[in-house]
Amino acid sequence: MFGLFGRKKKYKVKGRILVVENKSKLSKEYIKKITSVLLELFKKEVLLFKFRRLHIVLYDNAKDGRAGEAIEPDIIMINLSHLVDLIGGDVYSSLKKRLKEIIIHEAYHLLHHDMNSALRLFETRCNTRIIEELERLLESIDKPFKNTLEIESRFAKISISSIRTGITALLKKIWIEGLAKFLEGLYNGRLIFDEHTFAQLYSKAKEDMQKIEKSFALIRNALPKVNPSNKATMDRLIQRIDTFVGCVAIYRSYYIGEHIFYAIRYLDPDIDDEQMIRLHIYKLILLYERLMLKHGYQPVISLYSGSGIFDYKRTIKFISLELKKAMET
């Protein structure tokens, strides 16, 4: 059935449709095993009842660190490279458990995107900003340089601007991945509301945010010392920017976001799933900050107050000032 690359199979389940598309090069037997689990999940998982149609795309790419990806409105990509070690396992235990985690996580991404118009607008603005950054980079590359000083000066402007983009990416990941990780954990029983779990998630989030703040502090210390004509100072800045962006890019933001959503629900049990899904990122952080301070905890992130380990306004203000200086050179 799935012998050919890219073959699709459609299944009808009580008026709902599941499409399984195989783009992997794995064996027919393995794909059949995966498909049987997908069908069972589609038939039985309450969350998936919200989807009249779901399109699952199976692929294998060992270089892709993602286990899954959601593509609006109804596509879930599953990277089988993350599941090949389960091929000899029991289809209804280890394999099913892992597939369920991936599908539920990505299904919450689809619902989040569908139910939150602010998220869609935020993503559009983020994508626009990234495109603008790339255009500025290409413009700098194509435009003739007068001297080495101008080359370094333009590179400094691009680098400082990329930090601001990285901070926006941090907020986006906290918002999107944090929600999906939190709701998936609740749905699959990985998370329970008690003092121990709160303390555990809070400790992990603090540790990760301290690493992000520390990596940004290195940039903060390096920027005033940058001399565009001094290659060593420029190299040091670029290295520290790479470290910061790397901190944001890896899974730290997942755990920070999970803690934020968990803390809100733990400290205010009256807030339900739908309210969480519809929150704007700025309202989310303000609510989290207020609840944490009310109960005597330091927030891992704050928006304007400066109370968090990482403060958005303080950071953006610093970057804006440095960017203004760079634009004047």
Image (spheres, rainbow, N blue to C red):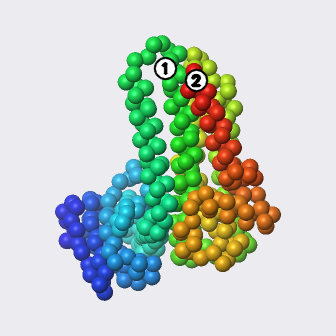
Q: Residues within 10 Å of mark 1 (few under 14, many from 20)?
A: some
Which residue occupies the extreme bottom position in the image? 14
Q: Residue 64: give x, y in percent of width and height.
A: 40, 52
What's the amino acid at mark 1? Answer: Ile
Q: Secondary structure at mark 1?
A: helix
Quadrant where the N terminus is found in the figure: bottom left
Quadrant where the C terminus is found in the figure: top right
Q: Viewer-proximal residue, 326 or 181?
A: 326
Residue at the image position 28 percent from the left and 72 percent from the top: 19
Q: Residue 214: give x, y in percent of width and height.
A: 68, 42
What's the amino acid at mark 2? Answer: Glu
Task: State whether residue 222 is above or below residue 106.
Answer: above
Residue at the image position 54 percent from the left and 74 percent from the top: 274
Location of mark 1 (residue): 151
User: Is residue 215 something that shows in the picture?
Assistant: no
Location of mark 2 (residue): 328
